[in-house]
Amino acid sequence: MAGNSFGKLFKLTTFGESHGTAIGGIIDGCPAGIKLDFDAIKNDMNRRKPGQSKIVTQRKEPDSVDFFSGIFEGITTGTPIGFVINNTNQKSKDYSHIKDVYRPSHADYTYDKKYGVRDYRGGGRSSARETACRVVAGAIAKQMLNHIKINAYTSAVGAIQLETSYEDLDFNLIESNPVRCPDSAAAKAMIERIAEVKKKGDTIGGVVTCVIQNVPPGLGEPVFDKLHAELGKAMLSINAVKGFEYGSGFKGAQMLGSDHNDRFNKDGSTQTNLSGGVQGGISNGMDIYFNVAFKPVATTLQKQETINASGEVVEMQGKGRHDPCVVPRAVPIVEAMAALVMADFTLLRRQETKDW
Amino acid sequence: MAGNSFGKLFKLTTFGESHGTAIGGIIDGCPAGIKLDFDAIKNDMNRRKPGQSKIVTQRKEPDSVDFFSGIFEGITTGTPIGFVINNTNQKSKDYSHIKDVYRPSHADYTYDKKYGVRDYRGGGRSSARETACRVVAGAIAKQMLNHIKINAYTSAVGAIQLETSYEDLDFNLIESNPVRCPDSAAAKAMIERIAEVKKKGDTIGGVVTCVIQNVPPGLGEPVFDKLHAELGKAMLSINAVKGFEYGSGFKGAQMLGSDHNDRFNKDGSTQTNLSGGVQGGISNGMDIYFNVAFKPVATTLQKQETINASGEVVEMQGKGRHDPCVVPRAVPIVEAMAALVMADFTLLRRQETKDW
Amino acid sequence: MAGNSFGKLFKLTTFGESHGTAIGGIIDGCPAGIKLDFDAIKNDMNRRKPGQSKIVTQRKEPDSVDFFSGIFEGITTGTPIGFVINNTNQKSKDYSHIKDVYRPSHADYTYDKKYGVRDYRGGGRSSARETACRVVAGAIAKQMLNHIKINAYTSAVGAIQLETSYEDLDFNLIESNPVRCPDSAAAKAMIERIAEVKKKGDTIGGVVTCVIQNVPPGLGEPVFDKLHAELGKAMLSINAVKGFEYGSGFKGAQMLGSDHNDRFNKDGSTQTNLSGGVQGGISNGMDIYFNVAFKPVATTLQKQETINASGEVVEMQGKGRHDPCVVPRAVPIVEAMAALVMADFTLLRRQETKDW
Amino acid sequence: MAGNSFGKLFKLTTFGESHGTAIGGIIDGCPAGIKLDFDAIKNDMNRRKPGQSKIVTQRKEPDSVDFFSGIFEGITTGTPIGFVINNTNQKSKDYSHIKDVYRPSHADYTYDKKYGVRDYRGGGRSSARETACRVVAGAIAKQMLNHIKINAYTSAVGAIQLETSYEDLDFNLIESNPVRCPDSAAAKAMIERIAEVKKKGDTIGGVVTCVIQNVPPGLGEPVFDKLHAELGKAMLSINAVKGFEYGSGFKGAQMLGSDHNDRFNKDGSTQTNLSGGVQGGISNGMDIYFNVAFKPVATTLQKQETINASGEVVEMQGKGRHDPCVVPRAVPIVEAMAALVMADFTLLRRQETKDW
């Protein structure tokens, strides 16, 4: 039902198809009095936008955002923030060849089954283009979260995995390379792997790791709206995501309780953090960290057989300019969704504090 | 905010602490006219309840549910279904020794930080006791989902992993052994492993796999309320869950697009199903399958150091009767949460169909 | 969709039919640390319960409430408060005669049309019995609202209307008579009128006025969730309510702007209060006051013709013990719903305050 | 919390200040496959827009709406419909004189108290300008409601009241005069009264009556989301509304049960309709009718004393072009909100029907 909103107190609702006039959204519930840093918003937009490096799609989209309301003299007023991003790069003709064709592992077929009608020009609503709106809202959420720090980075491209724990990484290096991996050796290997895959007209998957630091204890709601459950939903709502794990994650399922328990220090912090900063769905003040698995982009430039709306087998070949690997551009999207979740729980937390 | 409800159209709200008088809930939005099979509800309750086998806690709780409303002459009336499960087994004295103590990797500390006050007798609201209410609602949801079939089973206990794909398993064997693994050889190994761990007073993690079959296409909402995102949130809201993956999951992150894409058959089905039955957040009619990772139970019977509310280091040792491995009893809980998600999207789907 | 919940942050969900085993509810979102005054809750229950005076139904229901969770050692814990009120007075046989009969101006017909099945024993879910749960939650909400004072009273019974403005009334007199009118002369006339109507086996309508004082400025949400809009919905959700007006109300529609505007004093208060304490949907710190119109109870003890489920004309005559006028017992219900609205906006308000 | 959304399944979220760049909204949940009549949308916009007749504000605003998504080749796709209406007529200088001034009976003071910062140019978010977005969404909702007919009209301007029952009126005459009263004699008197008031620089209140016909039985949700309760909230959320009554309304509070009960005909219809088409919160198939009371516009052109943000008394005089009576332009807004409520309950109703 009306599934295009995210959050309860800090609430984003988005609209827009990849090849319509524009995409945009409304941020409802952003507190008043926040002096916005528009450069920071622009910077996150640039990290997500196409054409930023050789290893991502060469499509050109300025992705400039127009704010229509909720901001007066640079300061949020507490009223809804409406914004629009124009689609300047609608090469509809690029898509005419797939008008009736269901591209394998795309949402063409399911949208047709669900709605009976669809904007066949590209991904329409299912296109990752929609995530640009998430980045806008996330960038504003980050500015609301004074102290909480959110950093995401590429921790795997295909089989190339960064084994180093986040504690031993320098987050300042994330933006030092186009693949957004804070380890220069791993980054180099990942970039080469992507280049190789791209040359074959193929695509490859990967993993984004996200770390949330300086989190106050008490964020998250028992029992269904646990902090990590909302983070999981937020990440799984991003295009191409197939899995989510936090703290010890799937490895934790192989462990013994005697090894998995995090011992307390006297100040309430813990000596280990296999819990991943959350106990019983509520933040405990330790770092929150999680992994997000992305499948390879479904659009390859190789010939493949598929069917059309009439159930006829047709041959197709992806055209246009697509990402050989979605992960580098997904990093700011993961951060944005994490920021939306933390903003929502931060606002919610305020009504629980005892000092009436 | 009021995080004790799940679902939008088929909505469950629960209450209750592990050591209060009772737990219970309200199912709001269950359609009228469903003739309830109370034995089926009782059966799911029995699969979750303690004391059902040697490899789970020996605690005895009948877990009988009293329905107070929304059902007339055995048929649902469309009004809210209120139900209560009495806590017959409150051994409060078992817990007196941890009144001020924060048990490692439990929610004692975070609840204290969040609320400033808590029911210190056992897990209180954070206890898995609450999941009994989910099983009640899930059992009713299953009866609403005429055709959709939901089967969960234990696919891993610690390092013992069932490699067989779900397609090659006989779900009728799930209940043939106490660990709920439909492969007798693997089941035997898992049971032995749990017994071994139990003898040491330790605990161990594991994985539950769930398969949803006969799903009509069109369930799930773009863009934030994707079907797999809601399933992920549902599973991550279960106690002790650390990770969720569907379809190709984390393995998919290592694959190439040319290998990952699912080719269509003429009827719209696909030759492979790495997508896991969902495209763009909407069901495509293929089987939905996913894995849920559970950490080892935090309460071990071994001595461990921890702190109390005053920050003093104290030694504690778990008492009472706890599960050495939560996975066997988690199987019906995973099914219940899956049923709640499918019921919600099934009701929602009805308002989209074109035939006004 | 699942319309049995009220509120967003302070959220009440109720269940129960008039002739089921029990009714009850869950209060989710009540802050932790409130030391509950159970006598105050009992007192509000007694003000609503049947059999409390000669001018209300002589039905006897103790209406004692059992709390199952969310309260530990008399203090709220922040977890959901589950409660149940047993139906001790189910005279089902009283209702056997209307099994297939649609009583005029009752909900029998509409429930049948909506659900196709219903609990025909009395009003079922549509019975005002359900409001007992609202009074429980409202009594707890009142205790959360330290300073805000909520007083409702009977301002009209049929044509007998209390003309005195609330400012000239002594709210301490509200409970001094069974009709709950703080003006003894008017109260006397109202009581006589009700007795007269009762003798004829007839019923009569009336008006409840409610005044909310010591309200801080800033409560209420633009643009759809205006404070008075939520109050209006809350009141209109009470059985038998036909109208709601606040401040100048319908009289205001006849006025000139030059007469209607409230002049400011230097401190921001206003010299008049035709606005009724709300501007643009947000409280301005002045008293909030409103009127709620109740229709006459539909069940009269006079013979009347109606139809049954087969569309046959049948003669019926109300039996049992019904209220000749619902207004006296509605007073605490109006207060309860007002308290729920104010509690919700009070919690919400906290997340907006600037002092992060 | 994020109070700028209305509806659950057919959901409108709006943004925009009266003097920002633009206002707009997102309609989420509109079913796919509706061929939109854009002229009908334009027509409702024109009925609301300023400058349409002598008795409304002479401000000129084209109020043309741009749709950005959710519509493909003129047909709704089921994805969110994003739209924007540019503010072409921002005479900010007109408002410079009230930068720090709190206009009496406006929301300047309450927004300042709530948010601590506001767009002081005119009403900002509290301006009725926002209702243009409601009319856009309402016009689309009307097109979804094939059979249900919604007609609103002016039934009172100040003391001039139209006594004729809606059944004896010809709705085709509503648009035959600028005051939108389907009785030409009453219309003439109302227009003269408004002209008179306008000459004095004063304003006057009035009443809008709305009639919803061809409503199927079964719409509306027990117990809190009653059909008339949602209609009441919808109307009370419109600027300047002070009261709502449906069916017998406040008059019903003076009646006897023996007079108020609606007798059934054999087909389930009723001989009278004092209930106003709703029983127990659920539609019964009879006409739904209600009255909405509007206060006089707060901005008069007469000199008045007020205070500024520093609490100093200042003299002010409304400038610019304001409505002497809001009622004629409110008629399409009342219809729009009624349409949104009916659309929401119509979609919701679909998930209850028995034919699985």
Image (spheres, coloured by chain):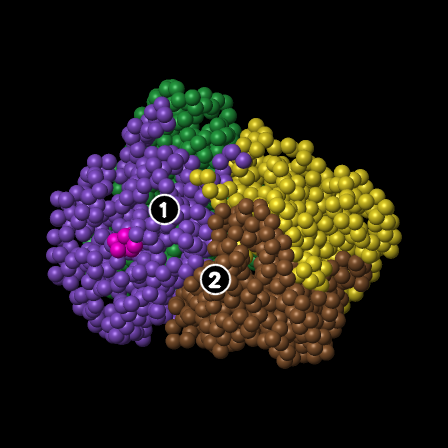
Chain colours: A purple, B green, C yellow, D brown
Q: Which residue is mark 2?
A: D92
Q: Is residue B214 above or below residue B26?
A: below
- In space, the residues marked 2 and 1 are separated at their CA atoms by 30 Å
Q: For the residue marked with disc 2, what is the amino acid?
A: Ser
Which residue is drawn at the image coordinates 21% and 38% (left, top)?
A: A169
**Image location (x, y in percent) of residue D223:** 62, 53
Instruction: Check the residue under mark 2 and report the chain it is in.
Output: D
Q: Quadrant of residue A277?
A: top left
Which residues, given as a range, are shown in magenta? A42-48
Most common SS among magenta residues: helix
User: Which-is-in-front pick, marks 2 and 1?
Assistant: 2
Count of labels in the image: 2
Q: Is residue D88 visible?
A: yes
Looking at the picture, tell me which residue is in the foreground, A218 or D196: D196
- Badge 1: residue crowd in 10 Å (few <14, some 14–19, many ≥20): some
Which residue is drawn at the image coordinates 53% and 74% (left, top)?
A: D46
Q: Is residue A278 above or below residue A336?
A: above
Residue D98 - label = none
Residue at disc 1, secondary structure: helix
Q: Is residue A276 shown in magenta?
A: no
Q: For the residue marked with disc 1, what is the amino acid?
A: Gln
**Image location (x, y in percent) of residue D239:** 58, 60
Which residue is drawn at the image coordinates 33% and 65% (left, top)?
A: A86
Q: Is residue A47 shown in magenta?
A: yes
Residue A143 - label = 1
